[in-house]
Amino acid sequence: MTWSLSPPIRRGLALSILLGLLLVAWEGVVSPLIGFPRDRQGQIDALSEELGRLRTMTARKPELERQAAAVQGQLAAEGGFWSGASAAAIAASVQDRLRQVVIGSGGRVKSTSEGKESSVSGFHEVTIRFSIEGTLETVQKTLAAIETSTPALFVNGLTIAAPSDLAARDRPPVLSLDLDVTGYMRPPRS
């Protein structure tokens, strides 16, 4: 059985196939090419905004550096920087100072860490970790010594633990104190 289509139907079918191919070509090739410049312009606009934000940040950099230098100058004027040949020398000085306070208040320094050095926001930090045992008086005097220290010392981390059994009521409980103490070295001259 063969199908035979009349010439007007064949022309109509050929025309619909041609229109379908044109529509597929339009959607697959031409439409993306037309949309490409719009997409690129959107990317260019987003990148231009980002560039503007970065330029604003870059313009603020000298002022922020001036403020950081002013803060460092203020800290130096108030005697806030530790002076020493190295971070190890400063750490030893801090350890000696706090060890005297702890022993003077009846406590015991169980351990200390070596001075860990780092640079944060243009400041050269020296951090020492202490593990101390003592009474509440030991804790108070240790924290008071850190607070009133010149050059300045700061507590970065503090944990106080009481013993789980408080059997001996005739004397104060022995507390465990773990703390990180930070001092600042004079920044290198630039």
Image (cartoon, rainbow, N blue to C red):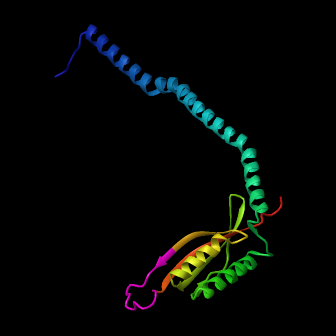
| Depth check, front residue: 179 or 79 | 79
Q: In which quarter of the image is residue 1?
A: top left
Instruction: Name the quadrant containing residue 149.
Output: bottom right
Please give left or right for residue 167 compared with residue 59 in the image: left
Q: Is residue 70 above or below residue 137?
A: above
Q: How many marks?
A: 0
Residue 24, compared with residue 97, is above or below; it is above
- Residue 88: percent from the left, percent from the top? 73, 79
- With 80 as the anchor, is 110 left or right in this view? left
Where residue 148 appears, x then y in whole percent? Answer: 66, 71
Q: Is the magenta stretch mostly helix, strand or loop?
A: loop
Query: How far from the left and from the top, in percent, is residue 109?
Result: 59, 86
| Furthest residue in direction right, as rendered | 189
Q: Which of 112 and 98 is in front in this view?
A: 98
Q: Can residue 150 be found in the magenta stretch?
A: no
Vertical relation: 38 (above or below) 153: above
Give the magenta part as a residue range: 159-172
Q: Residue at x 46, y 24 (%)?
A: 31
Q: Which residue is drawn at 44% across and 22% down?
A: 26
Residue furthest front in the image: 170
Left or right: 67, with 38 as reference point: right
Farthest top residue in view? 8
Q: Nearer the viewer, residue 96 or 84?
A: 96
Residue at the image point whose x is 62% and y is 88% from the top: 103
Question: Which quadrant does the C terminus fall into?
Answer: bottom right
Spot occupied by residue 42 in the image (x, y as percentages of width and height)? 55, 29
Give the answer, above or below, for where 70 lies relative to 50: below
